[in-house]
Amino acid sequence: MEEFIVTVDGPAGSGKSTIAKIVASKYGLTYLDTGAMYRMIALYALENNVNLEAMLENTKLDIVGNKFFLNGKDVSEEIRTPEVSGIVSPVAAIKAVRVKLVELQREISKGKKTILDGRDIGTVVFPNAQVKIFLVASPEERARRRLNEYKEKGIEADFESVITSIKERDHIDSTRKESPLMKADDAVEIDSSVMTIEEVV
Ligand code: DC
C-alpha cells in the first residue's frame, strides 16, 4: 500500500485528537497520537527519577489500538493526569527524546495510510505529507475543554490552574529550540474555537 499521511498540529486542547480519531475511522486511516508518546516518556521520568540516557534505553513504548503501554503496563489513563501534563513540555524539549520518538513515528507510519497529531508532524516528521492541518483555538476555549475532560474522569482541577498550565505549555512548546510548535507553510489553518466537531471534521 502506498504511504498516505495526514498531519494535524496545533497547541494543547485545540481538538487535534478528537478530530483525528473521527477522521481516521471515517476514512480508514491509522491514528497515531504522538503526544501520548511524549507523555509516556514523561511518566517514566516522573516515576523513576532516572537520568536521560537510562530513561531512553529502558523505555519500551507500545501502542495497541487506543491503548498505550509503557514497558508492558497499560498507562492510557495515567498519561493524561495534570502531573504528567505539568512536566511533559520540558521532557519533549529534549533533543534525544525527540530523535527517538520521531524515528518511532516514521516507523509506525511506514507504508500505511496514517493521520498523526502533534506539534511538529507537518514541519519535521512528515514535511511531504499529502494533507496538513494546523488546528488552533483560543486559550479560554482550550482550558474549558481540558477542564471538562478532567471532570469526566473525576480528576479535580480549576479553570485558573488549567489555563495557566495550557499557556505555560504553549510557551515552552512554541519557543523551544528543537522542532517548536509552528504552522507549516503549506498547512491549512482551522480555528475550532466556535466550530462544532462535525464542522471541523
Ligand atoms: O498533545 P498533547 O497535549 O498530548 O502533547 C503533550 C506534550 O508533548 C506537549 O506539551 C508537547 C509535546 N509534543 C511534542 O513536542 N511533539 C509532538 N509531536 C507531540 C507532543
Image (spheres, rainbow, N blue to C red):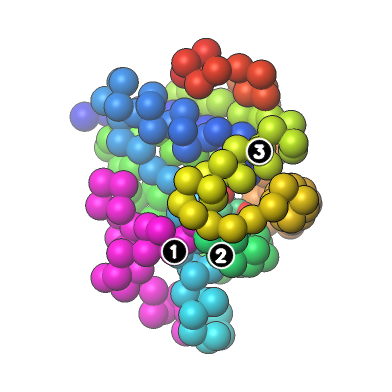
Q: What numbered label is drawn on residue 84?
A: 2
Disc on the earlier residue, 1 or 2: 1
Report whether residue 122 is seen.
no
Q: Decide if residue 148 is on the left or right side of residue 2.
A: right
- State the SS at label 2: helix
| Residue to which mark 1 is pinned | 78
Residues under numbered marks 1 and 2 in contact, where contact means CB atoms less than 8 Å apart: yes
Q: Position of residue 143 (x, y in %)?
A: 68, 42
Q: Is residue 181 above or below residue 127?
A: below
Residues under numbered marks 2 and 3 in contact, where contact means CB atoms less than 8 Å apart: no
The residue carrying pointer 3 sits among few (fewer than 14), some (14 to 19) or many (20 or more) residues within 10 Å by Cα, namely some
What's the magenta region? 53-80
Amino acid type assigned to the residue bearing label 1 in the image: Glu
Q: Is residue 65 magenta?
A: yes
Is 120 in front, or is 159? 159
Q: Residue at x 53, y 57 (%)?
A: 155
Please identify the quadrant where the N terminus is shown.
Answer: top left
The residue carrying pointer 1 sits among few (fewer than 14), some (14 to 19) or many (20 or more) residues within 10 Å by Cα, namely some
Q: Residue at x 39, y 80 (%)?
A: 58
Is 106 in front, or is 172? 172
Q: Marks 3 and 1, how far apart in space? A: 21 Å
Number of marks present in the image shown: 3
Q: Is residue 166 above or below residue 133?
A: below
| Residue to which mark 3 is pinned | 144
Q: Position of residue 192 (x, y in %)?
A: 63, 23
Amino acid type assigned to the residue bearing label 2 in the image: Val
Q: Decide if residue 15 is on the left or right side of residue 31.
A: right
